[in-house]
Image (tube, rainbow, N blue to C red):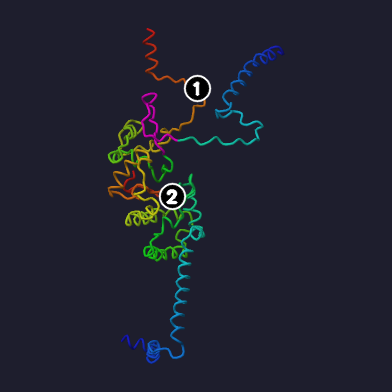
């Protein structure tokens, strides 16, 4: 049955010709042209792919949409991850996109859902954004809990954390909950870069 | 009618002088007490006083009178306290005090204003920072001669 559909669509002989052509040695093109040309084309393709990928991984790209610029980016500006004494700062992808390549690609594929949201205006007004804020925050909390707050740890490594430089309250909490692995960063540090949604029912919150 | 006006005008002169002198003292260099009249001329821009260092040593401060709201001896910068979230309660509410080892909010905070006990935090006690405040290392703008009730009782006892 499948064969007949394929035949109806492409024409039986045409597909067979095509396949035969693809698997017979080239007659007019040299082997050097095909290998080197393939190599150059590969470099160009891969370079282009990576350039575009990196271009979509910048704060400028994220804040080019008003949904991000007027809501979450404005909230970030007041926090320590945007302005602080030493001038080191985190941009959107530092926290929201994994740095490891495989995970990054997986996250980028998920982000196609966000393109859908942009096209159909899921959060194109402040009211819509606030209505969906808890849902979106929960997704991020879940993601960070699942990867043991990997994006936090890209900068804040437990090995380099000097507990003696922290105030006693923070040091005790880190020693008891983080170093034992009982909790991960996001369990306590929610809402450090953006405003929180309604926290009723969230564990650890009143 | 004329004389009393003149007299009262003359009578205010020493007070004005004293006022001017004390204003000089308070607003003098080193102390950044705000002048009630603002800068002179009033259109001049004055530099903002420097930010003061917060007290974050986690040492409980003595209360000046028994029902004084306790002070906050730690930084609260970035802690959410709005309609959606109350970060203070993540440590100080009854159910989280074991893991946080923080002092529990007073039992009065579980009562309504008629003294009836509620199942949770009374809504009128939700805004923690309305009464509880963090401290900075800023020097007092004016001398503080507050004496708590123990000190008053002690002096009275000694005089007797």
Direction right: furthest residue: B2
Q: Decide whether the magenta segment is chiefly helix, strand or loop.
A: loop
In the rendered image, the quadrant that contains the N terminus of chain B is: top right
Q: Disc 1 versus disc 2: distance between alpha carbons?
A: 40 Å
The magenta stretch spans residue B136: no
In the visual, does A178 lie left or right of A118? left
Q: Nearer the viewer, residue B64 or B119?
A: B64
In the visual, does A116 lie left or right of A177? right
Q: Which mark is drawn over residue B143?
A: 1
Q: Nearer the viewer, residue B123 or B42?
A: B42
Q: At numbered mark 2, what does the secondary structure look like: helix, strand or loop?
A: loop
User: Residue at image x 35%, y 47%?
Assistant: A188
Residue A75 appearing in the image: no
Q: Is residue B105 above or below residue B3?
A: below
User: Residue at image x 46%, y 35%?
Assistant: B53
User: Residue at image x 42%, y 32%?
Assistant: B131
**x, y percent for residue B40:** 65, 30
The residue stretch that appears in magenta = B54-75
Q: Nearer the viewer, residue A6 or A172?
A: A172
Residue that mark 2 sits on: A193
Direction bottom: furthest residue: A13
Q: Nearer the viewer, residue A1 or B119?
A: A1
**x, y percent for residue B25:** 58, 23
Q: At numbered mark 1, what does the secondary structure look like: helix, strand or loop?
A: loop
Few, some or many C-alpha atoms within 10 Å of disc 2 (few <14, some 14-19, many ≥20)?
A: many
Q: Is residue B152 above or below residue A51?
A: above
**Quadrant of the image occupied by residue B112:** top left
**x, y percent for residue A51:** 48, 67
Disc 1 sits on a residue from what chain? B
Q: Is residue B151 above or below residue A39?
A: above
């Amino acid at each position: 049955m499948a064969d007949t559909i394929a035949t109806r669509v492409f024409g039986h002989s045409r597909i067979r010709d095509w396949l035969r052509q693809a698997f017979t040695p080239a007659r007019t093109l040299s082997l050097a042209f095909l290998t080197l040309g393939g190599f150059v084309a590969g470099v160009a393709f891969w370079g282009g792919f990576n350039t575009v990928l990196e271009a979509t991984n910048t704060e400028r790209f994220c804040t080019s949409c008003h949904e991000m610029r007027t809501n979450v980016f404005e909230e970030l500006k007041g926090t320590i991850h945007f302005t602080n004494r030493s001038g080191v700062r985190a941009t959107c992808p530092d926290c929201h996109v994994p740095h490891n390549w495989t995970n990054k690609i997986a996250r980028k594929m998920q982000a196609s859902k966000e393109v859908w949201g942009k096209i159909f205006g899921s959060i194109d007004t402040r009211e819509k954004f606030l209505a969906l804020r808890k849902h979106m925050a929960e997704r991020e909390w879940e993601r960070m809990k699942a990867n043991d707050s990997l994006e936090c740890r890209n900068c804040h490594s437990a090995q380099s954390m000097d507990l003696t430089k922290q105030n006693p309250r923070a040091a005790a909490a880190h020693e008891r909950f983080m170093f034992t692995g009982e909790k991960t960063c996001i369990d306590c540090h929610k809402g450090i870069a953006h405003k929180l949604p309604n926290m009723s029912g969230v564990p650890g919150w009143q | 009618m004329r004389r009393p006006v003149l007299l009262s005008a003359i009578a205010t002169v020493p007070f004005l002088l004293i006022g001017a002198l004390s204003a000089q003292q308070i607003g003098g260099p080193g102390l950044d007490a705000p002048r009630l009249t603002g800068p002179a001329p009033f259109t001049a821009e004055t530099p903002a006083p420097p930010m003061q260092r917060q007290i974050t040593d986690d040492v409980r401060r003595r209360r000046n009178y028994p029902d004084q709201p306790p002070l906050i001896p730690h930084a609260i910068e970035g802690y959410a306290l709005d309609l959606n979230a109350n970060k203070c309660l993540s440590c100080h509410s009854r159910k989280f005090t074991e893991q946080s080892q923080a002092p529990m909010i007073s039992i009065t905070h579980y009562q309504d204003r008629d003294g009836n006990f509620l199942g949770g935090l009374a809504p009128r006690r939700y805004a923690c920072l309305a009464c509880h405040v963090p401290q900075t290392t800023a020097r007092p703008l004016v001398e503080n001669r507050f004496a708590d009730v123990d000190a008053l009782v002690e002096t009275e006892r000694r005089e007797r």
